[in-house]
Amino acid sequence: MLGSEHGAFRQHRIRRLGGRAPGPVATRPLRRERRTLRPPTGHRVVVRVRTCAVCRTDLHLAEGDLPPRRPGTVPGHEVVGDVVALGEEAGRLALGTRVGVAWLAGTCGECRYCRRGDENLCPDSTYTGWDIDGGYARYLTADERYVHPLSEALDDATAAPLLCAGIIGHRALARADLPAEGVLGIYGFGASAHLTAQVALSGGARVHVMTRSERARELALHLGCHSAAGPRDAPPEPLDSAILFAPVGDLVPTALAALDRGGTLSIAGIHLSDVPPLNYQEHLFQERGVRSVTANTRADARAFLAAAAEHPLSVQTTPYRFEDADRALADLAADRVDGAAVLVMTDD
């Protein structure tokens, strides 16, 4: 089924932001270009983009920390938009439905990981903005089975960062095994961390933030965190759990040393620089543990988005025009973004 505007976007070339070869963000690795948007097939739908948040994963892809899966892929996987066309097998979403398109774009559904509910570990999983074109564009196509209808309680700018920063923070917090009213340490305080901190605080946790950005430390205190210090400073009390959001491997020993006995460190990023050697007695003994976080499941997304609609979070955003995506990435790299950067599509 095709939306009323389908004939227009089928016949015209669509302005997008596509990737050049990866390189330092100072070299402006994105380029503006036009591409023909094809009609959707199968379970795929076309989404007209309203907003797209800027994730640190986009920065890793732009700079080559994560190798590209295919050349010229359009980045962006925190997308809010409207369904404007349906493939012949799509029937879950109606035309005009306001939806979110997140990082997980597809899985095989048949492997042992998918069958046991761990579809985030599927060897054949695909990702928005990495394997398929993402939301730095006027339109994108996505499999409706991996698209999330959004509550009207969440406005566009609020909803966009929830689609990755919020969801991955939700999973990272679960992986950290924070006990009831426990003590949580957060290393790095960007888009995901500032949401995760609020969830932990609402559950009665004491939260201590360690981050290099003075502005981020101010935001942490404003949101109610109990302390905010530099990334290598010791928290004021032993931590029951910690989450490392900063992609800095040499913070792993620092975070482990801050854990109390039996504590768990959850590493939330898709990319991490090399971890230095660990001392067993200092960093791991007394049953301290380390866990990685790999993407998310659709169940994670549904649970978090429902909770966020019912119990609103204070989502700090910094808006940018779509044409300024390069500047948003540069500001993110330099810690000049408060909360989450959000690209806002305007009609032109």
Image (cartoon, helix red, strand yellow):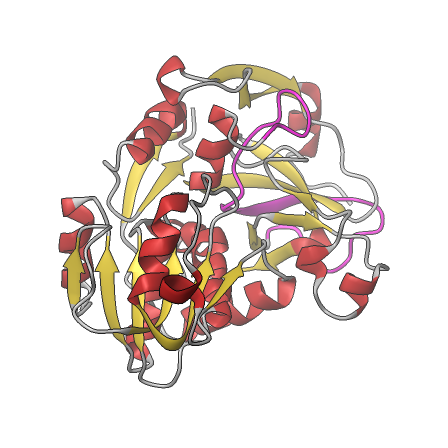
Residue 341 is left or right of residue 58, and the answer is: left
| Magenta span: chief secondary structure | loop
- Residue 136: percent from left, percent from top: 50, 31
Determine if residue 93 is in view: no
Whether residue 276 appears in this view of the structure is yes
**Against 32, is 73 above or below?**
below
In the rendered image, the vertical position of residue 85 relative to residue 138, given as above or below: below
Which residue is depicted at the point 81% across and 59% down? 109
Which residue sits at x=84%, y=46%? 88
Nearer the observer, 147 or 131:
131
Percent position of residue 114, x then y: 77, 63
Q: Position of residue 167 (x, y in %)?
A: 49, 60
Count of numbered tags: 0
Residue 178, quarter of the rendered image: bottom left
Quadrant where the image shows the N terminus: top right
- Quadrant the C terminus occupies: top left
**Residue 173 part of the magenta-drawn span:** no
Q: Which span is picked out in magenta?
A: 67-96
Rendering quarter of residue 283: bottom left
Which residue occupies the foreground of this view, 233 or 108? 233
Q: Quadrant of residue 266?
A: bottom left
**Is 78 one of the magenta-colored residues?**
yes
Q: Quick check: 195 above or below 201?
A: above
**Residue pushed farthest bottom?**
180
Residue 239: % across, % down: 30, 72
Q: Is residue 305 left or right of residue 95?
A: left
Residue at figure coordinates x 58%, y 48% from the top left: 103
